[in-house]
């Protein structure tokens, strides 16, 4: 802040110093004028003295050369010179007179004691004697001896004046002491009066200006304070504005960066959607199509312009029940995701299968705005799955034929017994009939045996025909115990043929399972046949196969086939279910692979445990069906 009062005090001090300097300059100027006046007076006196007195005493000046000061003071010319000087200076303010020759020796002085002194080094003497110019200076003498006596505290003008005669040559030097005490006192008084007057005027002006300046300073301070407050408010507002601008700039930068990232992500998402290998459909809440990607056009043959605004029902092939579409719409309208397989029709009339996921698109208020459908063309997968199932059927049929071939000898032996009984009974009947006797009771027993054994042979043949029949699998609700019991005779026949025995352990109150009985029986026959062959190295008494059913900890049903063979090596155990891997010399390695595929197709598991001490145990796990499902059936 500009401090006016301080500036005024500073300028006042400078003014006061300038006033003092002016007074000092005026005083010095007056003193110089005084010295000049005295010098002018002394020059006139010196000229008069040179013209009137010096010719008379010029021989004296030459005659004292070489004399001492005492000798010079004894010369009679001194008194004459003194008288002449007194006469010449009578009535003047000359207090003392000295005369020097050109060597600087004082040849006369109003102070007799100074006669004979050497003053050749005095600057004034040198200027007057050598250059011929007067030299004067103002001095103060505490004590001064003159013609009239001793004076004290005098202001004296000392003038060194050359003594020149008519020819203009310098013959000596006058030193005159003019008393200017009174004049200098007047000058000092005048200077003091002037200074006091100026100080009074300056003081009055200073006082008036001081109050004016002080008042102005207070006004300026108040105004400056107001300006500072306003400036501070402006600075705060500016700082606040700068902070807001910086924050807004930062937010704008972040928003721009976020928008750039969003646009980039949107571009990537758009490219990903457009180039996706899946068919993508976006519809409004009414189900009218708003967007489809290029994959949709590639698969269906419809372009975007052809399907915009239309309903996806245009693709329906009519092969699925209406309940499927009703469930679909109820699910997605409820805000949930629907997933399933749909058969649709292309533009050219071809049918195709699509694995579709349809989900609602929600806004910030969780309201459904659109529906998004993502579909994958699984037609080839469906065909491949159908071909795989057909191959599995072929392999299963082949497996049953192979098993039946391996069991052919046992089956022939099993059929031989009832056929032999039938033959014997028939021969007996014919013989009895030939005797023509009443043998009714005997014939009845024989005929009963024929019927019984014929039924037995028929059951065996029916079982064989059912086992090798090439029908597609159908799942139905079955009892695991019943399935095992129906092939018990075949299992026993195979065991007897190999000198082994079979023990069946059936658990009670097992829940039914949804399965194809023929396939489950094929798995059990295959596992049992492998177990019987694995015990061929044992003694006949140790060839014991155990087939049991039991409940599973997971709520399902378990079937175990245990043998007492030598067990499997770790390598065989690791690869036992691989296709075409076998430990038999004449085996093809498909039995266990097919068995595992059958069990897994039923939603179950087939596992194996084996050790040298306990043999090998295959475990089949099958899931059960609920009581509600049983009641519905």
Image (tube, rainbow, N blue to C red):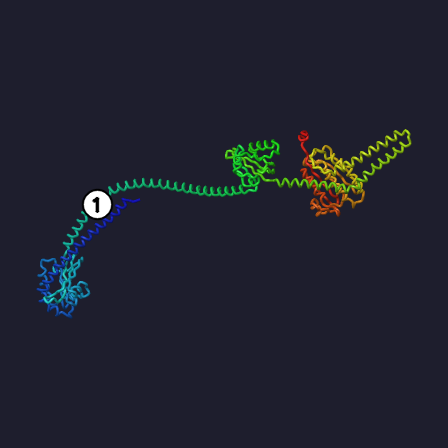
Q: Secondary structure beneath disc 1?
A: helix
Between 211 and 324, the one lying in front of the other is: 324
Between 187 and 615, the one lying in front of the other is: 615
The residue at the point 16 percent across, 52 percent down is 187
Query: Would you say residue 141 is visible in this rendering?
Result: no
Residue 214 higher or lower than 50, as above or below: above
Q: Is residue 588 left or right of residue 128?
A: right
Question: Circle 1 sits on which residue?
Answer: 203
Q: Is residue 143 left or right of residue 449?
A: left
Q: Position of residue 101 (x, y in %)?
A: 14, 67
Q: Position of residue 601 (x, y in %)?
A: 67, 39
For label 1, count other residues whose C-alpha is less than 10 Å away and answer few (under 14), some (14-19) or many (20+): some
Q: Is residue 441 left or right of residue 60?
A: right
Query: Would you say residue 198 is visible in this rendering?
Result: yes
Q: Position of residue 446 (x, y in %)?
A: 86, 32
Residue 181 higher or lower than 336, as above or below: below
The residue at the point 18 percent across, 66 percent down is 120
User: Which quarter of the picture shows residue 620?
Assistant: top right
The residue at the point 16 percent across, 61 percent down is 135
- Work out which quarter of the rendered image holds the C terminus and state it: top right
Residue 360 higher or lower than 61, as above or below: above
Q: Position of residue 162 (x, y in %)?
A: 14, 64
Q: Is residue 432 left or right of residue 216?
A: right
User: Which quarter of the picture shows residue 516?
Assistant: top right
């Amino acid at each position: 802040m500009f401090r006016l009062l301080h500036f005024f005090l500073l300028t006042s001090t400078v003014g006061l110093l300038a006033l003092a300097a002016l007074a000092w300059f005026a005083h010095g100027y007056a003193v110089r004028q005084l010295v000049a006046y005295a010098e002018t007076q002394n020059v006139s006196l010196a000229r008069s003295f040179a013209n009137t007195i010096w010719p008379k005493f010029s021989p004296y000046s030459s005659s004292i050369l070489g004399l001492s000061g005492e000798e010079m003071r004894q010369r009679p010319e001194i008194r004459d010179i003194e008288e002449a000087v007194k006469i010449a200076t009578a009535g003047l303010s000359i207090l003392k007179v000295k005369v020097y020759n050109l060597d600087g020796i004082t040849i006369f002085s109003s102070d007799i004691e100074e006669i004979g002194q050497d003053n050749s080094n005095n600057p004034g003497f040198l200027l007057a004697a050598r250059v011929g110019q007067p030299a004067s200076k103002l001095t103060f003498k505490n004590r001064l001896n003159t013609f009239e006596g001793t004076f004290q505290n005098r202001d004296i003008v000392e003038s060194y004046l050359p003594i020149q005669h008519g020819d203009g040559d310098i013959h000596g030097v006058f030193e005159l002491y003019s008393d200017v005490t009174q004049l200098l006192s007047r000058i000092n008084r005048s200077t003091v009066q002037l200074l006091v007057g100026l100080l009074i005027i300056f003081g009055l002006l200073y006082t008036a200006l001081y109050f004016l300046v002080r008042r102005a300073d207070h006004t300026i301070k108040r105004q400056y304070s107001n300006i500072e407050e306003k400036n501070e408010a402006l600075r705060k507002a500016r700082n606040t504005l700068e902070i807001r601008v910086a924050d807004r700039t930062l937010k704008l930068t972040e928003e721009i960066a976020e928008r750039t990232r969003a646009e980039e992500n949107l571009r990537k998402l758009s490219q990903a959607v457009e180039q996706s290998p899946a068919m993508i459909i976006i519809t409004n809440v009414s189900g009218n199509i708003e967007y489809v990607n290029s994959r949709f056009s590639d698969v269906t043959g419809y372009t975007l312009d052809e399907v915009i605004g239309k309903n996806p029902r245009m693709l329906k092939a009519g092969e699925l029940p209406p309940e499927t579409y009703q469930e679909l719409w109820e699910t997605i309208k409820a805000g949930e995701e629907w997933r399933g397989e749909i058969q649709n029709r292309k533009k050219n009339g071809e049918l195709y299968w699509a694995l579709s996921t349809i989900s609602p698109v929600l806004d910030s208020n969780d309201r459904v705005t659109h529906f998004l459908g993502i579909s994958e063309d699984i037609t080839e997968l469906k065909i491949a799955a159908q071909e795989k199932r057909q191959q599995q059927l072929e392999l299963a049929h082949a497996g049953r034929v192979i098993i039946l071939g391996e069991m052919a000898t046992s089956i022939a032996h099993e059929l031989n017994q009832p056929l032999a009984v039938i033959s014997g009974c028939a021969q007996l009947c014919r013989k009895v009939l030939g005797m023509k006797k009443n043998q009714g009771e005997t014939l009845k027993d024989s005929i009963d045996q024929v019927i019984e054994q014929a039924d037995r042979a028929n059951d065996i043949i029916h079982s064989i025909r059912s086992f090798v029949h090439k029908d597609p699998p159908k799942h139905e609700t079955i009892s695991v115990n019943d399935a095992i019991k129906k092939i018990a005779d075949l299992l026993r026949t195979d065991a007897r043929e190999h000198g082994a025995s079979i023990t069946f352990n059936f658990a009670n109150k097992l829940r039914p399972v949804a399965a194809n009985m023929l396939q489950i029986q094929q798995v059990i026959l295959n596992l049992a046949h492998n177990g019987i062959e694995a015990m061929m190295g044992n003694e006949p008494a140790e060839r014991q196969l155990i087939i049991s059913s039991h409940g599973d900890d997971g709520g399902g049903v378990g079937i175990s086939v245990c043998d007492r063979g030598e067990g499997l090596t770790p390598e065989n155990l690791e690869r036992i279910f691989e296709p075409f891997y076998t430990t038999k010399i004449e085996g093809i390695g498909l039995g266990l692979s097919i068995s595992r595929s059958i069990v897994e197709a039923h939603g179950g598991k087939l596992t194996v445990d084996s050790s040298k001490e306990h043999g090998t145990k295959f475990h089949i796990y099958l899931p059960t069906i609920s009581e509600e499902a049983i009641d519905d059936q």
